[in-house]
Amino acid sequence: MKRMIWMLWGLIMAMTACGQTYKYKVNFNVSESDFCDTIPIVVEEGRLILIVEMEGRQRRLLLDTGAGQGVVYRDGSIRGERELGNVVVADGNNRRDTVQVVTMPSFRMGRLVISDYVATLMPRPIGNRRIDGIVGFDLFNKGLSAKIDLQSKTLILTDRRKLFDNESGYEVRYKVYWFVPYVMVSPFIRHTDQVLFDTGSTSLFTMNKESFDRHVYKSQQVAAQVEARTEGSHSIGLLGAEQHDEIVLLHMDRLDWGGFAFTDLRAITTQGASRIGTQLLQYGSVVINPWKKRIKFQPFNGTDTVSVGNRVPNVSFVPIGGRPAVGLIWPTCDAYRLGMRQGDVILSIDDKPMRTFEDFVLFHFVKGQQHRYRLRDREGNIKEIAIER
């Protein structure tokens, strides 16, 4: 469990930074008290975006419960107003770095003005040019309750402790480890797992590989839900891709959240923490109550179960030495049959050079169209294949 806690997507603060050390606080200011405000949310590629006004301009901030505090990017347009010191952070793949802590300029979301909000200065995720920064779980650690509803695309934010008490739903307790929320769910019958509730992740469920190994060792029922195994890496954190390891594809009978069951669910293992992400919000709204340390799921269909029937990507690409490369490929897919392998570096697509991973992320793929990949394998051999992506 100790290792899992360190493997967060967002900010995991250690108090051993060099130089002046910043210690976690939630003493930023909220302009109103005894309030309830409805704030619009923009949903893009499964991510929750808050449009805020900062220094007379609109900024796009990712709402990320897997981050302990805010984030601004070193190459971004948001500049820190005041330097607070340094912290050691680890991303979702346990890669660590010492980074600077600053305060963001004051910003308005809805009718609320947030001032002296703390953020770490981080490298920008590759290809993530449309996000200016992150608002983390400290918004709720501050004592603000919230309801996130993607049907209405709204965030209802309040400091009134009992506002959501009478609403129905399936409730689980959370514990705060390193300033972010972990809940207990049941991925297999008679098994429980502690998972990060992470709106910075777009999947419904991913499972820590070490945790999965403990479950499968105990039960043939768990082993029967393994659909495939391979080796590679697929997760990209703020500080780089995860290390090469075995990856397991699960076809799960159900995932239980406080009595609500997600059935026919596929998930893959990762070296980072087990997590539930924003795909949960496609099936219901969520209420976060920091006073009682509970998260309530309110299904849109009004029942106690939903069939997911999702698929996972056949191929995942990661940066290797700054270049785009095949991090994960399932042997049953067409790309593998045509000759693509884990570790292949992409040299060009449709004769356009892929000199950096960002070149690949920004390439305009056309759904249903074949694209020609020029690849270099791990032995240095060059090959070309045409596949749909």
Image: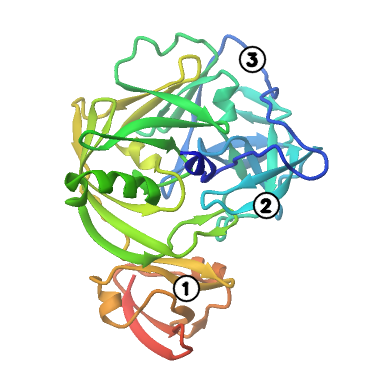
Q: Is 361 placed above or below 204 here?
A: below
* Among the 4 quarters of the image, the one containing residue 384: bottom left
Q: Label 1's element?
A: strand
Q: CA distance from mark 1 to mark 3?
A: 49 Å
In the rendered image, the quadrant that contains the C terminus is bottom left
Q: Which residue corresponds to mark 3?
A: 32
Q: Nearer the viewer, mark 1 or mark 2?
A: 2
Out of 240 and 356, give the one closest to the viewer: 240
| Amino acid beneath label 2 | Asp
What residue would you read off at disc 1? Answer: 325
User: Which type of secondary structure does the marked residue at label 2 adopt?
Assistant: strand
Front: mark 3 or 2:
2
Percent from the top left, x then y, of residue 302?
21, 25
Q: Residues within 10 Å of mark 3 (few under 14, many from 20)?
A: few
- The residue type indicated by label 1 comes to Ala
Q: Quarter of the image holding residue 198? A: top left
What amino acid does circle 3 point to?
Answer: Glu
Residue drawn at x 70%, y 24% is 28
x, y percentage for residue 348? 48, 82
Say which residue appears at 67% left-offset and 52% top-offset.
97
Q: Could you say which is closer to the camera, residue 251 or residue 247?
A: 247
Which residue matches tag 2?
A: 97
Mark 3 and mark 2: Cα distance apart in space: 36 Å
Could you say where residue 34 lies in the image, as x and y percent from the top left? Answer: 58, 9
Sequence-first tag of 3 and 2? 3
**Mark earlier in primary sequence (1, 2):** 2
